[in-house]
Amino acid sequence: MNRKLVFIAMLLIPAILFAGGKKDAGTGAAPAAEKPVTLKVWESTNGPDEFIKKAGEAFTAKYPNVTIEYVNVELGDAAGQIALDGPAGVGPDLFAAPHDKLGELVSGGHVLPTVNADALKTEVLGACSTALTYSGKMYGYPVSAETYALFYNKALIKESELPKTWEDLAAFAKKFNAANSGKYGFIMDVGNAYYTIVFTTSDGNRLFGPSGTDTTSTNINSAKSVKGMQFFQNLRSALNVPSADLTTSVADAAFAAGTAAMHITGLWNVVPFKDAGIDFGVTALPSLPGDKNPSASFSGTRAMFVSAYSDYPEEAAKFAEFLVSEEMQQLRFNITGALPAINTKVDSPYMGGFLQQLDYAFPMPSIPQMGAYWEAMNNASKNIWDGADVQKELDACNAAILGK
Amino acid sequence: MEKILSLDGSEEKKITITASCFMGLSHIVHLKDYVKGIFFALTEVLFIVFSPVIVSKIISLITLGSPQPDLPIKQRSNSIFMLIDGILILAVIALFIVIYVISVKSAQERYREICRKKSYTSQRASITTSFSKAFPIAGLAPSFILLLVFVVVPLVFSICVAFTNYSAPAHIPPNNTVDWVGFQNFKDLMGGQATWSAGFARVALWTLTWAFFATLTCYFGGLFIAVLLKESKIKISPVFRVIFILPYAVPAVVSMLVWKNLLNGTFGTVNRTLMYFGLIGDPIPWLSSPLLAQITVIIVNMWAGFGYFMLLTMGTMTAVSQDLYEAARIDGANKFQVLGKITLPLVLYQTMPLIIMSFTHNINNFGAIFFLTGGNPTVVDSTTTSAGGTDILVTWIYKLTITLLKYNYASVIAVMIFIVLAPFAIYNFRRTKAYKEGEL
């Protein structure tokens, strides 16, 4: 008899739990100002999680009825996950995603537009608000920005020698290579479309047009691109290493070992290079032949989006806005070391170069065709570096992106 | 309803027709086997009750949904769910047909039995026989259903994808729908689209070359070392055995990544050492020239895999009867003759199924390629197909699905691999003694 009771009790427990869960959601549907609200936030580990927890505490101190619950969903997974979890009712109220997922998120109806977009636009960096604008409307709240720039090893190159143009860079590298055997004047990952896009951007030539949304032409095989990539091919004379040997990890390792004077990489490498004991600086990229300004790079924006499936959109928007405030942006920089999304003064010798480059960066396009861009342009870049016909490679790349 | 059947077997046709009209009908009406009849009838009633669902799922399977750009995404029809649901429903229908056939057969059988005994058996007796007959079926049913749902349905699903246009950017659900395209993908990969076909032919040819040489080098490398260890009379041969098995014991992912760094043409230790000692002037492009990279992966794979075959052939060699060796020695055979006429034939005979298994394994040896070269270096068609010079079909499938989202082409390749590998698997399976001597 006793056993039976236990068995029945075991059956009942989940039922009670489920009933409890339902009830909670029920009351949540009608939010009242003073009712306790729990906002679920998706963020990555290694820094952003700590920031969200601390910011959550600060926000709760300000609005006692709101508590922030952190859930680990990595940045890259969030956009895919929200499509499943949102409709199922187990999704977050806010989630972090890179801006290039915006097209997918908006066309999927997973995110809500920014509240007070006009006010926010004046506060955040220009590159960030453009990146988060999709067909004229702004979505989400930028929390950090990202781009890559030219790193230089102060022991190997003097600040006065820093190249202003790519030709200068090639000339310096050739001279340096000849003088220092086993060392490289310049190194970069030549098989990575994230960096090689730089060479296609002369004179305002942009991937998928100026707005980054033109699906009829990629501009990747336009005359300007071909010219730029031909220059890229000639750069081989300043860095005579086959593309298969020149991966991101190899280039990073060479710079960290002090065998490369210049390297193109991003913020994520500041700490590793510092730990490796390299005395380095960061500056804007050189300019392409015929251009005056530093060549354009891809910029990325990490944004906090309010889920369209949230029961508390108002509170969620308030928290997201709070994350963009000066105080929180400083806190975020101190924890993660990532570039702030607003124009605030941060205490780091490396940020100047990135912020300078950010002025000339353009948001990575967020249209679905970008998915095909990476693999095609990676391979085209490798083949071009190894001596293939530039026009033919870029035509093939264009066709692959457009799915022809 | 009480009808008297003629018990001379003349009414079998009537029984069959009644049984075919509605499941279990003849059991109830003619054969007085009510329990069984009701069970069959209930199955059919259940099927009829759910038939609207079944019909709508089948229609979805055929249409795979129509584009509904005005609806929010979560309300749009998801072609891939429709495809999976449809295949599941097909499995249910197949199950239903099987039960239907069983019910008709069972009716015929019972009628024949009644004719033979010239009387109706009691209900109780019929239940008892049914139960004892149904026991193996009931026992196997769960595993059969699991097999159907978790093996057959996914298999059929992945084959079906080869006949759709499930690919980025225009046909990825739930944003967009997927449509049936017949043999279009097969045509594209076999001559329809020049670059893709050339890429496919290149990768397929390399896959077979790779599998052949990877198996050959590992097997004979292992055999060679095993013979050497057995024949040499050094005392510490167990120590060598341990050393030789180490590469096999280290996870391949780790050792492949290490080799990748060692063999880097410009920055790798191997070339730098050779250049330091002045053995070579220019770096050897281990992983950056397509042909040399192919040779490199075969050699590195041999390094990682020969230990397994060394142990295997060693084990087989100890099983060879000493009498044979003794007889050979008395007859005056030298060591090479003993090796060539006794050891090798016996070992080869014993390990042949394993060589074939190893060949099929190597065709799908993802890790050896992906972690060592990642498919690099790039070749002429890489920009379009994303397949590099050392990519084999599986690593290409990985790139096609994970980065390019071209599930249709990936599925075609998977089907082709299946067609190539299935004969090997069946041959190997049929050779095993368990199959020959088993009751099946």
Image (cartoon, rainbow, N blue to C red):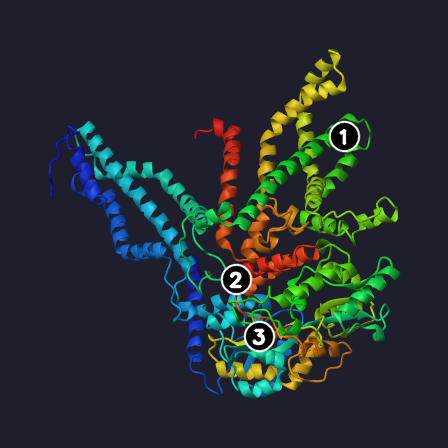
Is residue A191 something one can see in this rendering?
yes
Q: Where is A304 relative to B281, above or below?
A: below
From the image, which quarter does the N terminus of chain A lie in?
bottom left
Report x, y in % for residue B96.
31, 46
At a point 32% along the width and 42% down the height, the residue shown is: B98
Closer to the eye: label 3 or 1: 3
Q: Chain of mark 1?
A: B
Q: Is residue B66 left or right of residue B421?
A: left
Asked whether disc 3 touches disc 1, contact meaning CB atoms under 8 Å apart, the reply is: no
Q: Chain of mark 2?
A: A
Decide which of tag 2 and tag 3 comes sooner along the chain: 3
Q: Given the image, on which type of amino acid does mark 1 rest?
A: Leu
Q: Is residue A274 visible?
A: no
Please tell me how many numbered marks the rendered image carries: 3
* Dot 1 and dot 2 within a common chain: no
Cα–Cα gap, marks 1 and 2:
59 Å
- In this rendering, the answer to whether B421 lies above or below B266 is above
The x and y percentages for residue B254 are: 70, 50
- Quarter of image, res B347: top right
Q: Secondary structure at mark 1?
A: helix
Q: Is residue B37 left or right of residue A284?
A: left
Question: Residue at (85%, 57%) from the top-left corner?
Answer: A182
Mark 3 is on which residue type? Pro
Residue B229: image tag:
1
**Along the line of sight, the residue nearer the viewer: A399 or B202:** A399
The numbered mark 3 sits on a residue in which chain?
Answer: A
Q: Mark 3 — residue?
A: A210
Within 10 Å of disc 1 (Cα), the crowding (few <14, some 14-19, many 20+) is: some
Residue A402 bears which disc, if any?
A: 2
Residue A363 position (above or below residue B262): below
- Do tags 3 and 1 sit on the same chain? no
Q: Does B242 sit left or right of A83 as displayed?
A: right
